[in-house]
Image (spheres, grey):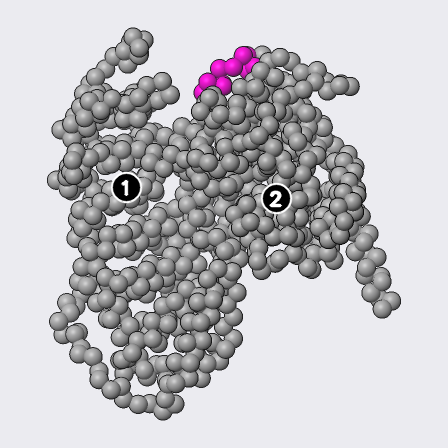
Amino acid sequence: MNSQSPRDLFLLHECVGKGNFGDVYRATEKSTNRIVAVKIVDLDESDEDINILIQEVQFLSQLKSPYITGYFNTYIQDVSMWISMEYCGGGSCADLLKCHRKLDETAVAYITRDVLRGLEYLHLQQKVHRDVKAANILLTANGGVKLADFGVSGQLSYTQVKRDTFVGTPFWMAPEVILRKAGYNEKADIWSLGITVIELAKGVPPHVGGEPMKVLFQIPSMPAPLLEDDPHGTAYSDLIKDFIKYCLVKNPAKRPSTTTLLRHKYFRSILRKYTLVPLIQQKDRWLAKNSKISKSKRPRLSLDYDPTPLNPIDWRLTENCQSGSTPNSGGVSPLTPKTSGGTSPCTSTPPQKDENRKEDHSCSLSLDGNVILACLNRVASRAKTEETKVSVLELGRVLHSYESRQPGLCEAIAEEICLYVHKHREFL
Amino acid sequence: MAFLFKRNPKTPGEVVRLLNEQVAKIDTTNDRRKDEAARYLKQMKLILHGDDETDPVPDQIAQLAQEIYQTDTLFVLVDHLGSLDFDSRKDVVTLFSSLLRRQIGSRAPTVDYLLSKPKILLLLLKGPENPEIGLVCGQILRHCIKFEGITRFVLQERCVWNCFQYCQLSTFELATDASNILYDLLTVHKKPASEFLTQNYQYVTLHLNRLIQLTNYVTKRQSVRLLSALILERQNHFFLNKYVDDPNNLKVVMLLLSDKSKNVQIEGFDIFKVFVAKPKKEKAILDVLIKNKENFIKFFENFVIERSSGNLTLIEERDYILSEIKNLPDIERRSSVPLVSQEADEQVYGTDP
């Protein structure tokens, strides 16, 4: 295979994201001088069958659509795999939400339409994305919308019509994915898209304050969420509400396809010259001003950044749902039981390291500095009485709401704790 | 339903004929024929699979298939794969897979057809030589070799050996795909695979050992995985016996044990244990084992297995192998009954077949 070392081919810049299976870097491809995104996956670390990763890459290389992040090439360096892809300089839609809190309906319609086009392309080839959410919608510097992160996307064949695995992120999960009754198909993406539209318009997906485990049970049994007018603020148009209603049909067989949805009136109002560029630039200025973030170890917000700290809990839930329950990891708290990548003293004892190696690995990938929330979560799981637990969780929820207003807050607290501990050690 | 007929007035036969015409005349200067070809391929897909509003009609499918066989459409398509547009190529993959699955009684007419027109399969086998279409050819080929008859045919072709070369291509997707195709060819249909391995023991091990010793981690992992599968398959006992009697193979596997990657070590161990567990070992094998006895003991005492799944058996196996090695004599000793050497009967090849 390739004799050229990717180390010689690329000049790596800052880490721009932590995706499934590996970190993503902004890089310059030396031969062409173009900026690319390079995802580096440690193959020896992963317990995952190496063939699954190979399949992912082969699948990526067979996609060509303006609405999907493009794939360039893959190289092997020692035991790691370097995948070079199109670089999206505009960050993710989750980044946009961090700055703007919520997006206006035109922006939402514009993004939704292009995501639908990307999904239409995928679905035409019997591919299911399985993890549609704002954090996985990337933007180019000139306002292009691209569906990204196929780390867990599956491939349907004509014979095997439905997937039967449990992947996704709880709040965005379709009822049939949770119930796992008859497997699921590409219609699951339509549901997740509906939730994403709510997320873009409101700033958060439905149920966001709830406990993931509970939400997981609620989604199939409760009526589908609706986009409701904010009591002291935004009133949403009937068109967007109607569009969401179509996406969030609980019976997947009755949920419309991408092609049908693209004909929805909701998209007729989009002007041809509309562009997301001003929103992206505003966000970049906002990020630049927020020196706390740019000075931190992550030079900018990760592509994968999720405004809620609850993001990767699916891994644990998978485990729990399958193997009954483990008392400690129970996922009963609204805070992600993340373990960190070594930025704080708490991280030296990740829970059930051996038992759940894969899960912990994936959790640590998207810690995003929420060490404090992770610690609180661990405290909650140690609580002896229900009352203590509720209090700790409430504290976490409050902290989280401040964190989303003041990004970097938790990280700053963690830094202070680190300093404190170090000082303390010297005295000992 | 009347509107459907208006939209799609062509019979399956007509669609196939029109497709053939367009594809045969495709040229690089004009995209019109490419677009037309893409359109007809989509129509064929619609006939085969239906869509949200229509179900496929068996009669139409039969007509379509018949016309495709009669006009050599599959050959025309594979031959012009590089001139079709990116997404049309994938439609060709779908077309092959749907046609291959069609059965009339116990017969698979597309399999029979492909076997009667070997040039199609040969073109597919050479796919990786054109990077643009290599992966698509590989996908089609993999659908084909799901059928024993086709696997048997492919294994008898000289160009199957090229797959070992393709595993070293610089394009990651092509190299890994070639490796997966080899795996399927040599493991899915046990009978033709085992016959092939018996006839070509020497060559297969030569090629695999070469691939295993490459520095590329992925090539190494994939070839070790294939070798493991070949050795552990009961039908391949002839291959196994030849393999574990050759000290050269043992040396290659010992290198795997000392690889810096834990996964390679563990996979290497899976093969190594077969050498040690064999009751009557060749003298040459015993020599190597005895010579390295101390090394092995040191190695296995530090061989920590931390993989979460199935490590219990792995640990038991390690302890068993360690005790076997400890039982080896310290000084060289002749093995009791040397196996009859079969080398004289073996056909000796040059460098590459």
Q: Is mark 1 on a helix, strand or loop?
A: helix
The residue beneath circle 2 is A313
- Which quadrant does the C terminus of chain B fall into? bottom left
Q: Which residue is at 64% across, 13% downward?
A: A237
User: Which amino acid type corresponds to the residue marked 1 in the rendered image?
Assistant: His
Magenta residues span: A259-268
Q: Residue B3: x percent and y percent?
A: 32, 8
Label 2–label 1 contact, CB within 8 A: no
Q: Which mark is residue A222?
A: none
Residue at left offset 43%, top offset 29%: A123
Residue A19 place in picture, x, y as percent: 57, 44
* Residue B143: mark in rendering: 1
- Residue B200, given in percent of the width and then of the height, sits at 20, 62
Helix, strand or loop for the magenta stretch, by majority: helix
Residue B292 lies left or right of residue A344; in this view the side is left
Residue found 76% across the figure and 43% down from its top = A390
Residue type at mark 2: give it: Ile
